[in-house]
Each structure stands twice: as C-alpha cells, then as structure tokens.
Image: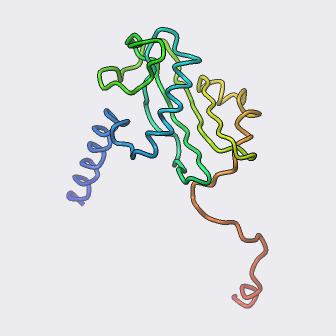
Amino acid sequence: MDCALKVLLLAALILLVSAQNGYRNLPYVQQKYVDKALEKANQDLGGNSHIAFQSLKGIPNTMKSSFYVNAHLIVTPCKKASPNAYEHRDDCVTQKPNTPIIDCLVCKTKDGQELVDCARLMDVNNGKRKEIRDNCEKYFPSGGVIIGLQKPQFLDDVK
C-alpha cells in the first residue's frame, strides 16, 4: 500500500509539472487547433494583453475528417508582442488578476466548415454560445458507437 501511495503521488507531481508548460507538451496536431483558438481569442478578446493556453477541456478529436478541440485560455499580464501576435510564449503563462477564463472551441461543423468560437467560460456555461456551438458535428469522446437500445433476446434466457 505504501508503494501504491508513492506511485500515486509521483503521478500527481508529474501531472502538476507538465501542466506548467502544457502547450509544449501537446502533440503537434493539437497545437495546430490550439493555435487557431489563440489567434481568434487574441483577435476578439485580447485587447493589448497576450492570451495564453491553459488547458484542454475533455478529450480532443483531431482526425482530419472530423475535429473537435475545446481549449481554456487565460489573459496574461504580458503585453502583445505585436498587434497580430498570438503564438505561445513560455514567458507568459500566468493569469492576469480579475480576468475570466476564455473557452475556445475549434470544430468541424455539420456542413463541413471549420468553426472557431471563443467566449468567456461563464458565458459558455450559461448557454450563451449554445446556438453557435450546436453547429459542430456531434463528437463522442468515448469513441463508442451506439448500436441499439433494445435488450438482446438472448438475455431473456438468463436468470
């Protein structure tokens, strides 16, 4: 039991350390979608402040035919390097006081287009972006397929 506790603590420490530089730990394909979110958020919500990646929400889907990446971003105390700058900066990863988390969704819509939608997390949680985000193709992170809801006949024989 003592060994299991040490392993658990080590795993928690590794997760904590990797979260400090989370953007660099993302696979390239996920970084590509996070970059689109960063660009949109910096364009629409950043003002003069740099916006940085904080974390991914849920399990991203990054297949070519269907993609769905939900990222949480933060406004940092750093100034933008230039008006169009949005790239990740290792020196700017702390949240500016009294600023909300930004929730960005990059997905493939039902008509095959790409949607990049960024808003304050509290607005997303209150359903204010539901109509826009409902245009995304449905994505089931478990990867499972729902085949049917009827009880199989062979279960009738089991007592």
Q: Is residue 50 above or below residue 138?
A: above
Q: Where on the picture, by quarter, is residue 86?
A: top left
Residue 97 percent across, percent down from the top left: 43, 12
In the rendered structure, the answer to whether residue 121 lies left or right of residue 112 reads left
* The C terminus, quarter of image: bottom right
Q: How many numbered discs? A: 0
Which of 51 and 33 lies nearest the eye of the viewer?
Answer: 33
Residue 157 percent across, percent down from the top left: 73, 91
Q: Residue at x 38, y 43 (%)?
A: 26
Q: Residue at x 37, y 12 (%)?
A: 78
In the rendered structure, the answer to whether residue 92 lies left or right of residue 128 reads left
Residue 124 percent across, percent down from the top left: 65, 29
Which of 98 and 86 lies nearest the eye of the viewer?
Answer: 86
* The N terminus, quarter of image: bottom left
Q: Residue at x 59, y 36 (%)?
A: 105
In the rendered structure, the answer to whether residue 148 lies left or right of residue 63 reads right
State how the image is colored: rainbow
Which of 47 and 156 lies nearest the eye of the viewer?
Answer: 47
